[in-house]
């Protein structure tokens, strides 16, 4: 293993990062490079991005205990650069007081909810370095060709106030509230209210990977479930994505698979493996 030049990235490195991500994940990944490499997951968690190579060919993003992103250009794999980069990330995480390192699946800002099942070489590479599978997550790909329209007895709109974000964070968790703030910045947040204007549910796109047709997060207050609010919000968000010109949407890191299979046209599913190692 050689000696590698590893340094912390700045916003001035964004174009180089976009080229690396395009090389590894395809051209569409460049759209979300700035969000993944320089935006926080939550307000209390710092995002740090590292580059390897004098002319960068690899990138890693550390946020708390999460390795949000690791990408090495294929033409330079097998030379020890990936090992050197991940060792640097481990050192930085330990210095920050972390006792484990989790690959991807970072609530609040994730590129993917794990390592995709098709990346068998990446999974084997991580296992060789002591990482173990701790969870699996599923994304569903949904056709937008024909989207059912569902009505409910609640108004759905996009007007939002700070108290709404506070309610979402208190009810569904800080990470969900953070994602909803990002969705709102990209005009992707929809809210359901009762006749008195009380917020009872929400759904969004652009909560993660803004610029991609990703659905989520979404939630309905427990006392209001079973009243058709969730499916009405789902339909509203998917129609909005279709108006933006997308043919498919991805329902990311979901829980109730049956809910989506019942109400929309699911064309495929994608499974992801969450990997972690003790430090």
Image (tube, rainbow, N blue to C red):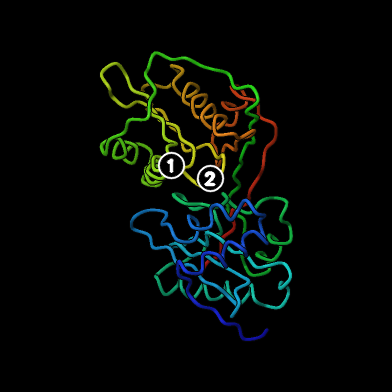
| Earlier-in-chain disc, 1 versus 2 | 1
Q: Is 37 in front, or is 218?
A: 37
Where 215 sits versus 66, above or below?
Answer: above
Q: Which mark is residue 83?
A: none
Q: Quadrant of the N terminus?
A: bottom right
Q: Is 246 in front, or is 152?
A: 246
- Residue 246, by quadrant, is top right
> Residue, x 41% and y 30% (percent of image)?
190
The answer to whether the residue labelled 1 contacts the one labelled 2, judged by CB atoms less than 8 Å apart, is yes
Indicate the position of residue 121 as horizontal and vertical percent values: 73, 61
Indicate the position of residue 71 as horizontal and vertical percent values: 62, 64
Q: Is 271 in front, or is 202?
A: 202
- Count neighbours of disc 1 (C-alpha within 10 A) and say few if under 14, some if 14 to 19, many if 20 or more: some
Q: Secondary structure at mark 2?
A: loop
Residue holding disc 2:
211
- Residue 254, by quadrant, is top right
Q: Residue furthest bottom?
A: 3
- CA–CA distance between discs 1 and 2? 9 Å
- Count neighbours of disc 2 (C-alpha within 10 A) and say few if under 14, some if 14 to 19, many if 20 or more: some
> Residue, x 56% and y 43% (percent of image)?
212
Residue holding disc 1:
186
> Residue, x 60% and y 82% (percent of image)?
4
């Amino acid at each position: 293993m050689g000696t590698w030049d590893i340094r912390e990235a700045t916003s001035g490195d964004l174009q180089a990062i976009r080229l690396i991500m395009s090389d590894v994940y395809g051209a569409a990944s460049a759209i979300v490079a700035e969000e993944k490499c320089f935006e926080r997951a939550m307000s209390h968690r710092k995002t740090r991005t590292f580059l390897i190579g004098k002319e960068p060919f690899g990138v890693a993003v550390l946020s708390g205990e999460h390795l949000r992103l690791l990408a090495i250009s294929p033409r330079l794999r097998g030379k020890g650069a990936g090992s050197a980069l991940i060792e640097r990330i481990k050192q930085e995480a330990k210095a920050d007081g972390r006792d484990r390192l989790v690959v991807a699946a970072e609530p609040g800002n994730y590129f993917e909810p794990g390592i995709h099942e098709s990346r068998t070489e990446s999974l084997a590479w991580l296992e060789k370095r002591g990482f173990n599978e701790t969870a699996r997550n599923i994304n569903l790909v949904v056709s937008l060709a024909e989207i059912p329209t569902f009505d409910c007895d609640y108004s759905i709109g996009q007007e939002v106030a700070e108290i709404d974000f506070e309610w979402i964070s208190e009810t569904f968790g800080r990470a969900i509230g953070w994602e909803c703030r990002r969705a709102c910045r990209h005009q992707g947040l929809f809210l359901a209210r009762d006749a008195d204007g009380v917020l009872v549910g929400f759904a969004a796109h652009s909560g993660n990977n803004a610029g991609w047709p990703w659905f989520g997060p979404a939630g309905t207050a427990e006392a209001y479930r079973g009243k058709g609010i969730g499916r009405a919000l789902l339909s509203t968000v998917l129609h909005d994505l279709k108006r933006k010109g997308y043919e498919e949407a991805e329902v990311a890191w979901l829980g109730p698979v049956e809910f989506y299979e019942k109400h929309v046209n699911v064309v495929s599913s994608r499974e992801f493996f969450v990997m972690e190692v003790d430090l």
